[in-house]
């Protein structure tokens, strides 16, 4: 096989993969992203422990993972933005618009949590970029 | 008054099931903290007296320049769109500004949106206690207040089921209220 033929085959395979990544539908799955506030979080904060129990930055994607679920496993209520989550309770929050927002959150040592909601990875370049990022994170 | 623009992030929910609420939802739901305040109807207003109805519970003030009138106009539209089911939908608005919001003033203000809407006022300390129970914030800023703009949805059995954010499409709120009414 000539070198030019090998290069042509490789280019063809790459183009096929890119086209697949751009247009193949995203597999359906749960759109919920669960985060748990561990038991003892309040006590740890009161004792001066500043280690984070939750990520301070959460990234969601419309149409893929766009429902944030916060579960409070601590034995005291926790506040997330305007929401008071009682011990043992979950709060399920669907996002419908892309954006970048900071919430007050009592489970964080900083008292803040940032959530970025990315637009839906529509077919085309945006889906290709989303898939590339997804694979890099995996 | 500063707008809670973050609430707009929730404006177009993407619930998969027809029975799933499009608002932020609590699981398991707890009983909505009960309270008795001075009602705009000139009688005491006790939240639990509305058991059997779905209650939209909001916090605001009659001098609010934007958020509260918008919210109340949208809730009036929700009630209209509910049609016959609207008789089982009750809006309760609790003031964060007891100095200005007398029962009479709240009655005049709220009935302009819908004659069935009721308001609640009372001593500042008691109102602060109610807000604390719900996780509502209200901070005085000059002549107004920076306050939580979410509306709480309480089901027929008195459970606090969901939070509907400011900016939510009327049809989405109608959907959620219908889900709760039909349970």
Image (tube, helix red, strand yellow):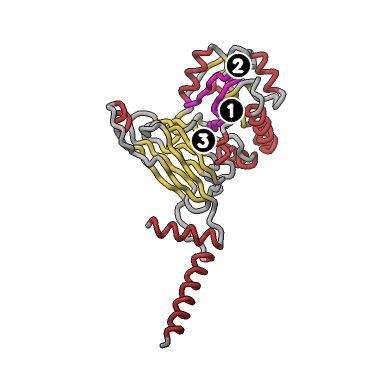
User: Mark 2 or mark 3: which comes first in sequence?
Assistant: 2
Residue B150 image offset from top left, x and y in percent: 55, 31
Q: Secondary structure at mark 1?
A: loop
Extreme residue toward the front, this view: A3
In reply to whether residue B154 is colored magenta, the answer given is yes
| Viewer-closest of A138 and A10 | A10
Q: Residue B176 sits in which quadrant?
A: top right
Residue at label 1?
B2
- Using the image, name the chain to which the residue with label 3 belongs: B
- Using the image, name the chain to which the residue with label 1 belongs: B
Residue at label 2?
B39
Cβ atoms under marks 2 and 3 closer than 8 Å: no
Label 2: how many Cα within 10 Å (few below 14, some 14–19, many 20+)? many
| Viewer-closest of B98 and B108 | B98
Give the label on residue A26, or none: none
Mark 2–mark 3 distance (CA, rounded to whole Å): 24 Å
Position of residue B26 in the picture relative to residue B97 (left or right): left
Residue at label 3?
B162
């Amino acid at each position: 096989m000539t070198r030019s033929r090998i290069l042509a085959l490789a280019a063809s395979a790459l183009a096929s993969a890119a086209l697949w990544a751009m247009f193949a539908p995203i597999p359906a799955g749960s759109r919920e992203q669960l985060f748990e506030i561990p038991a003892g979080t309040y006590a740890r904060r009161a004792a001066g422990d500043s280690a984070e129990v939750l990520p301070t930055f959460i990234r969601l994607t419309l149409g893929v993972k766009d429902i944030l679920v916060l579960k409070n496993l601590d034995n005291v209520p926790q506040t997330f933005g305007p929401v008071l989550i009682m011990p043992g309770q979950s709060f399920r929050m669907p996002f419908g618009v892309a954006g970048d927002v900071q919430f007050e959150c009592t489970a964080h040592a900083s008292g803040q949590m940032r959530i970025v909601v990315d637009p839906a990875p529509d077919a085309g370049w945006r889906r290709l970029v989303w898939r590339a990022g997804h694979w890099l994170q995996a | 008054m500063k707008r809670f623009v973050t609430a707009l992030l929730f404006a177009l929910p993407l619930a998969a099931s027809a029975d799933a609420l499009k608002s932020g939802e609590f699981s398991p739901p707890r009983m909505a903290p009960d309270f008795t305040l001075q009602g705009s109807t000139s009688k005491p207003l006790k939240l639990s007296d509305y058991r059997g109805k779905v209650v939209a519970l909001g916090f605001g003030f009659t001098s609010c320049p934007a958020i509260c009138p918008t919210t109340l106009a949208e809730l009036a539209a929700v009630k209209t769109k509910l049609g016959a089911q609207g008789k089982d939908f009750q809006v309760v608005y609790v003031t964060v500004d007891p100095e200005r919001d007398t029962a009479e003033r709240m009655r005049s203000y709220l009935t302009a949106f819908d004659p069935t809407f009721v308001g609640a006022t009372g001593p500042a300390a008691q109102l602060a206690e109610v807000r604390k129970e719900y996780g509502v914030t209200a901070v005085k800023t000059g002549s107004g207040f920076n306050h939580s703009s979410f509306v709480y949805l309480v089901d027929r059995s008195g459970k606090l089921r969901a939070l509907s954010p400011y900016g939510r499409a009327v049809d989405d709120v109608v959907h959620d209220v219908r889900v709760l009414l039909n349970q």
